[in-house]
Image (cartoon, grey):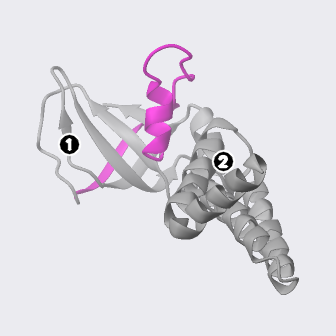
Amino acid sequence: MAITEARTRRELIVRRYPAVFLLLFIVAGIVSADLIHTAGYWYLIISLIGILTGFVLYRSKKESWAFYAAAVSILGFCGFHYLMPFTGEANERAKQLIAGNNLYTIYGTVIDWPEIKRNRTEFVIGLDSLVNDKLHIVQERILLKVTDSTTALQRGDRLIFRGRVYSLPPPSKKGFDYSRWLTLKRIVGITYL
């Protein structure tokens, strides 16, 4: 009797507040994608399985189970959508170019307002291309650190300069993880001038 009451109470809450229930699955998809470092296509596969399972359950007149399968599908899609900017062939190609530690002519645009620090200014640069002995089209972001407190560059300015693009520092296990913070801002490398 008590199990039946708890089940009906749970179903009543899900029926009365479906958005809150789905929000839990959205958050779970994003958090799991952030914590479990796996390829994004696994989340897309989970999403597709959830959609197909939900459709089959709905056709079988099991609407409540179909709703749960749709929620799992939303979890998978949110995890996939979260991982899209951080994975993929273009992102990996840019990281390989940066890992080479070569001197490049860098073409890009300042895409964010400068952040003025005590002894330096930081700019987020949207790369157009990197040129050493050949042209590499790269659509990623780097962090440009200028060793001067300057506001000579503003958002939208086009840049051409020579420099080395360094990889992000290794992830920190304690305290603030600077590498993760830069990755969440979709920055793949750091350049110093």
Q: Is residue 53 above or below residue 25?
A: below
Q: Is residue 15 visible?
A: yes
State the residue in front, 58 or 11.
11
Q: Residues within 10 Å of mark 1 (few under 14, many from 20)?
A: many
Residue occupied by mark 1:
114
Disc 1 secondary structure class: loop
Q: Residue 179: horizontal and vertical position, in percent? A: 49, 29
100 vs 156, left or right, is right
Q: CA distance from mark 2 to mark 1?
A: 27 Å
67 vs 161, left or right, is right
Image quarter of residue 15: bottom right
The kind of residue on which mark 2 rests is Glu
Q: How many marks?
A: 2
Q: Residue furthest top?
A: 174
State the residue in front, 87 or 51.
51
* Residue 175 in magenta stretch: yes
Q: Earlier in the sequence, mark 2 or mark 1?
A: 2
Residue segment shown in magenta: 157-186
Q: Residue 56: horizontal and vertical position, in percent? A: 86, 80
Residue occupied by mark 2:
92
Q: Residue at x 16, y 51 (%)?
A: 154
Disc 2 secondary structure class: helix
Q: Is residue 106 above or below residue 115?
A: below
Tell me the tag on residue 47.
Answer: none
Q: Residue 38: horizontal and vertical position, in percent? A: 74, 43
The kind of residue on which mark 1 rests is Pro
Q: Is residue 165 visible?
A: no
Q: Residues within 10 Å of mark 2 (few under 14, many from 20)?
A: few
